[in-house]
Image (cartoon, rainbow, N blue to C red):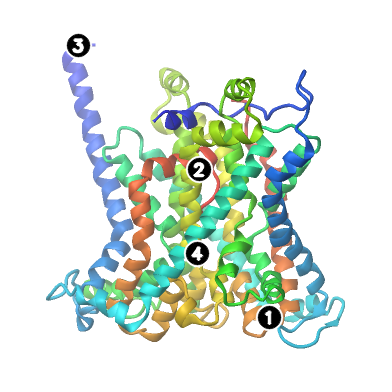
Amino acid sequence: MAHVTQTREPRAKRPATPLRSGREAGTPYPTVASFLSPSLIGLAVFTLLPIAMALVMAFFDWPAFGSRSFIGLDNFRSLAGDPVFRAAVRNTLVFVVLYVPLNIVVSMVLAAWMSPRIRGRQFLRVLFFLPVITPMVANAVVWRLLYQPGGSIDGTWEWLTGSHAPNFLGDASWAMVAVVVMSVWQGFGYNMIVFSAAIEAVPESVTEAARIDGAGPVRTFFSVVLPMISPAIFFATTMTVITSMQVFVQPFLLTGGGPGTATETLVMYIYQAGFSSFSLGLASAASWVLLVIVLGLTAVQFRAQRRWVSYDV
Amino acid sequence: MTSEVRSAKIRAWSARSVVSHVALYLVALIFAAPLILMVATSLKPADEVFTSPPQLLGSSIRWQNYADVFSFMPFQRYILNSFLVAAIGTVVVLVASSLSAYAFARLRWAGRDSVFLLFLATLMIPQEVLVVPMFLLMQWFGWIDSFQSLIFPWAFTAFGTFLLRQFFLTVPRELDEAARLDGAGVWRTFWSVILPLSRSSIAVLAVFTFIAYWNSYLWPLIIIDSTDTMSTVPLGLSLFVGQQGTFWNLIMAASVVSMAPTILLLILLQRHLLRGIATSGLGGR
């Protein structure tokens, strides 16, 4: 198992081979190209080309089948004037605002709670991680059984109280909450693993020093551990914001975007514009709106990190 | 510290520890409830899915539900499709990303760091942003409704390259030097030194890639028209829900079937996979 211990070695700060270090010449370009070309060509064809295509298509009336014509900014104007699109943007942002903090808090609480003193810790970790790797479609289907009227939650509720539970997926004031709760259940295990590793990397000498200074476990956690793992929190938050902007499967299968447009999201809008209405131009314009929001949020987070993330420990 | 004081302390800590354990396992039980319910419902007779008061178990254990799933829909076909797509896709990802990771981690060439930065930048582009132009690209290629379209468009993301580069950097350079002194060229070093030493990280990437292909839904939903023969497991499951919407026992059986391979992989490789996330901190959702 030599290779196992290999990956455990501290990897963090070792720089890549510096260029021009001493006597060794660079690798000849044909050799470099032979190593690099599969990835580079693949990335050019399947990522860079499509992203450029999307930008071009956004300025065209581009039906999936039939002739296309340049229409300037009309697609973006249609988006701005479309109440469904506005609802989709608003719902997506609401989802992010509800989902990300809940996800981070739940995963942090469980990561801190599951200290090495907890028996069956590995079992619990695997359990909490399970829905991260099971197909989202299956997860969503199971939660439909829980949420629907007469379903498991309603049935239990009726048995306990004699009255019916709200119609979680059919009631506009509950639908988004239902989607968020299911998504947190499904997704937090990932950040929990990240946080748990970060907490374990805090040197015991540091927490021990805090304890000797009279800090209790809660104080130690908030004043010592939390600042020390702030890079992990920053990383997890950034990634979670990016992925939650792309929410699709949960509302698509739980509510179909309804009731009305209560849970319609940006990616659902892109899907419907592109593959139900077959207006690829409009869908491309919406895709670019999504990309700009994602990049914008990421930039804001990187800017804000200077205020609260400390790398110097 | 006298022994009485110490044992009192241990007792006090133990009481807290017991409360902590009980509460944590209660949370775990609530968390697991949807999964328990899924398995329980998958074994119930159809008319006992909704009962008041709710029952976890039906009057009989009906394994027949699982057989029924396969007779209502060609699920075995979907499993085979998903398996082929995921397996071939994983091989493509491993080959492409281990080669480029080596170029970034070990070879010296001008412009390397800028190209690597370009790779990293593409990590920020969500797949969902690309599906519309990708559909058009597949039309041009004549790949609509084909396995190629399920495999190749997502096989060249920078994630695998990034992950393996990080691992390759941890292989001591002295080993390369030794191989070089023995007359091995870069290919030989890559194949006989770097790859064997990175087996476990390559395995982690392989499993995550396989699972990502297996779970993929939006893209198959867009690109697959012949749903009877070309569906993958998640697509088939969602169609099954559409067609058999009221047979919750069968739907749950189908869900169990679609989850089974991923759960099995996680349980078998738990330590590798969880450590893979902890060290790379990327991938998944």
Q: Position of residue A39 (x, y in %)?
A: 67, 51
CA distance for labels 2 and 1? 47 Å
In front of the other: label 3 or label 1?
1
Amino acid on which the number 4 mark rests in the picture: Val
Q: Earlier in the sequence, mark 4 or mark 3?
A: 3
CA distance for labels 2 and 3? 54 Å
Say which residue label 4 marks.
Answer: B85
* SS state under label 1: helix
Q: Earlier in the sequence, mark 2 or mark 3?
A: 3
* Image-based side of B130 in relation to A60, left or right: left
Q: Quadrant of the C terminus of chain A?
A: top right
- Which residue ends up furthest to the bottom in the rendered image? A66
In front of the other: label 2 or label 1?
2
Per the rendering, the mark at residue B202 is: 2
Per the rendering, the mark at residue B2 is: 3
CA distance for labels 4 and 2? 19 Å
In front of the other: label 1 or label 4?
4
Q: Are marks 4 and 3 on the same chain?
A: yes
Amino acid on which the number 2 mark rests in the picture: Ile
* SS state under label 3: loop
Say which residue label 1 marks.
Answer: A83
Tell me the crowding category of disc 1: few under 14, some 14 to 19, or many 20 or more residues within 10 angstroms, Cα based.
few
Amino acid on which the number 3 mark rests in the picture: Thr
